[in-house]
Image (cartoon, helix red, strand yellow):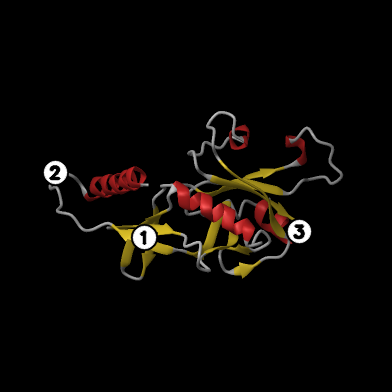
């Protein structure tokens, strides 16, 4: 199965256009819905209505299917960092969608950072165990319908980015080792391509 690294071309218009709130995030990381009682801060409103979670995780294989074509994509640490920066530099922080289908009003990325420390990172405080280089964000939800009908009912569980990226490379097909199952081969192939990209990057 093909494994494709997606990259950003900083000279082009490619990049992340919006953050979507979804039931099944492709990166398999749920967000944490933050309420006022989880903070030692004075609150004017009853709830902060902030969702915190991973936006992009480096080197995580993400399955994709386009008709009969099945493949995996992944993003390097460098691409995750560039994507996080370009998203804000291009003033996209108020762009959001529901399940990649419906544009939403009232959702804004209000905090954004890259995980640089597995012990002291803010994400650890909220029970997230994310790899170094992960892009984490907090989204303020000033949309009553989305908060009450989707967040509180857990119909949405995480973030998923949407945008335009370029393909950097495809893993060439290699001879099959008869001693391994297809699943084992796929996992090994993903591990190999990610290791190679890290060594070459």
Where, quadrant-wise, is the N terminus in this rendering?
Answer: bottom left
Badge nearest the viewer, 3 or 1: 1
| Mark 2 crowdedness (10 Å alpha carbons): few <14, some 14-19, many ≥20 | few
Task: Say which residue appears at 70% left-offset and 48% top-offset.
Answer: 50
In the image, residue 187 sits, relative to residue 37, either above or below, namely: below
Badge nearest the viewer, 2 or 1: 1
Query: Visible in this render: residue 78?
Result: yes
Residue on which disc 1 sits: 168
Task: Say which residue appears at 63% left-offset and 56% top-offset.
Answer: 88
Task: Say which residue appears at 60% left-offset and 54% top-offset.
Answer: 156
Q: Secondary structure at mark 3?
A: helix
Which label number is shown at residue 144? 3
Q: Alpha-carbon distance for marks 3 and 2?
A: 55 Å
Residue on which disc 2 sits: 179
Which label number is shown at residue 24? none
Q: Secondary structure at mark 2?
A: loop
- Residue 179 image position (x, y, % from top left): 14, 43
Of residues 119 and 78, the one nearer the viewer is 78
| Mark 1 crowdedness (10 Å alpha carbons): few <14, some 14-19, many ≥20 | few
Using residue 78 as the reference point, say whether residue 121 is left or right of it: right
Question: In terms of image quadrants, where is residue 184?
Answer: top left
- Residue 14 image position (x, y, % from top left): 51, 66
């Amino acid at each position: 199965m093909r494994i494709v690294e997606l990259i950003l071309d900083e000279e082009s218009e490619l990049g992340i256009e919006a953050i979507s709130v979804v039931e099944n995030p492709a990166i398999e990381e749920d967000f944490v819905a933050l309420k006022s009682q989880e903070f030692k801060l004075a609150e004017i409103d009853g709830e902060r209505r902030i969702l915190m979670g991973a936006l992009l995780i480096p080197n995580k294989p993400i399955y994709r299917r386009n008709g009969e074509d099945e493949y995996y994509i992944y993003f390097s640490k460098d691409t995750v960092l560039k994507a996080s920066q370009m998203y804000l530099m291009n003033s996209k922080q108020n762009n959001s969608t529901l399940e990649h289908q419906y544009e939403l009003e009232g959702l804004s990325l209000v905090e954004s950072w890259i995980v640089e420390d597995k012990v002291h990172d803010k994400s650890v405080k909220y029970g997230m165990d994310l790899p170094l280089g992960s892009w984490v964000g907090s989204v303020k939800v000033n949309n009553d319908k989305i908060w009450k009908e989707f967040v509180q009912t857990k119909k949405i569980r995480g973030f998923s980015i949407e945008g335009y990226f370029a393909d950097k490379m495809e893993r060439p097909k290699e001879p099959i080792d008869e001693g391994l199952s297809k699943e084992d081969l796929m996992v090994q192939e993903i591990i190999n391509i990610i290791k190679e990209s890290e060594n070459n990057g």
